[in-house]
Every structure is written in C-alpha cells, then in structure tokens.
Amino acid sequence: MRSYLSSMAFLQKRENRTYTLELVLEESNVGPLTWRCIPCPPEAVEKMVVDISLDGKEGEVRFWGCGGPTGTVRSLYQSLNWFVHCGPLLDHEKMLARPLRLRSLELLLAVESRVCCGELAALLERMADSRMLCGVVGHYAVCKGLERIEADVKERLGTTPTVPREWDRYGFEWGEISGLKETIGSARMRPLESGSG
C-alpha cells in the first residue's frame, strides 16, 4: 500500500498530495487536532488545508494583544513547527529525516466564527515578511466564506525561518526539537486525535 501511495500515478493528482486538518481554537491556545485526510507519505505532501473553528464559547479569539502576538499565535506556530519536523503523528521521538516544505498552507475560518479573516492574514503577512515562514511555506491563503486573502512567501528573504528579536523566548522557537516538547507543553497542546481518512 505504501508503495502505491508513493507512486507517481497516485501523486500526480493534487488532492492526493493534500493533508486536511481540523483545528479548534480556544481562548488563547490551540485545542483538539483531528486529521481528516492523510492520503500520502509526509515527504510527498505539498499542501495543508486547516479547517479552523472555535470551541463554542462566547468571546472572540484575538491574534494580537498588548504589545505582541497572543498565545493562540504561539500555539498555531508551534503546531506548524511540529508538523514540519515530526509529520502528522506529531511524535517528537520519531522525527522526519528532513523537515517538510509546504507549497501551500490554506487556513479556512468557520463562517460563523468571530475571527477576522483580515487580522489573521495580516499576521501571516507579518510572519512571512519577518522570515518566520521562509523555507517552510511557499504560499498561504486565509479564507472565510467568500472572502479570500492570499500571498506568496518571498524566497529572496532566505530559506531558514528566523524569529524576530522582539518575539524571541516567547514560545516561537523554531527547528530544534530538543526544546519543543516543553514549548508545546507550555502551550497546552492536546494529543492528536484519530480520524484520518
């Protein structure tokens, strides 16, 4: 089966190189993660679609607080970090031989949510411009209903993610997994739920 999933006949269809993830945003963290589609081995994935919903509580999820990004942003960034280095199992003891690189990252916001599409897109733009997504994501899009904001990550900025000095030591560490377990733990990430298809 694995050889078929890695074959060119299977992988030439774009949808067979796309992972789909459901993610729940809580007040200041990422809640449960549920994989809905993992059609190919991690080394063949090109696109990740993330369906984002709220946990049902009243209130509004914010991405920017007094003077900087909120805990939600830190949790989202570290979720991407873990996926890139550990694959869909998010197991720090079974790291991938090489970090993944996504051609496209698409964030789909639930229409009924109070999350602002423009606010999340502006945050991604800032992260891309400050080199936090370099070498990890080639293109990103944020969608909510009919609204769609997208952009390319400028390759001229480099191929290694760099965290801005003012965000350093606030849970935005990238790459080395040695400290990631503690970082994810501090962000109160929940274990991966089964549900891949």
Image (cartoon, helix red, strand yellow):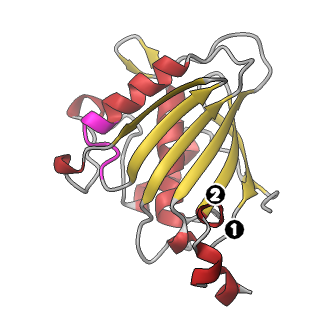
- Asked if disc 2 and disc 1 are in contact, CB closer than 8 Å, the reply is yes
Q: Toward the viewer: 90 or 10? A: 10
Task: Identify the amino acid type marked 1.
Answer: Pro
The vertical placement of 193 against 154, above or below, is below
Q: Could one spot residue 41 in this view of the protein?
A: no
Q: Is residue 129 magenta?
A: yes
Q: Which residue: 40% across, 26% down? A: 123
Residue bearing the label numbered 1: 39
Q: Is residue 103 magenta?
A: no
Task: Identify the amino acid type marked 2.
Answer: Tyr
Q: Which mark is residue 19?
A: 2
Residue at disc 2, secondary structure: strand
Q: Toward the viewer: 11 or 25? A: 11
Instruction: Please give the range of residues in magenta.
Output: 128-134
Q: Residues within 10 Å of mark 1 (few under 14, many from 20)?
A: many
Q: Toward the viewer: 31 or 140? A: 140
Q: Main secondary structure of the magenta part?
A: loop
The vertical placement of 8 against 176, above or below, is below
Q: Which residue: 54% across, 21% down? A: 117
Q: Toward the viewer: 186 or 61? A: 61
> Which part of the image, by quadrant, shows the C terminus?
bottom right
Residue at disc 1, secondary structure: loop
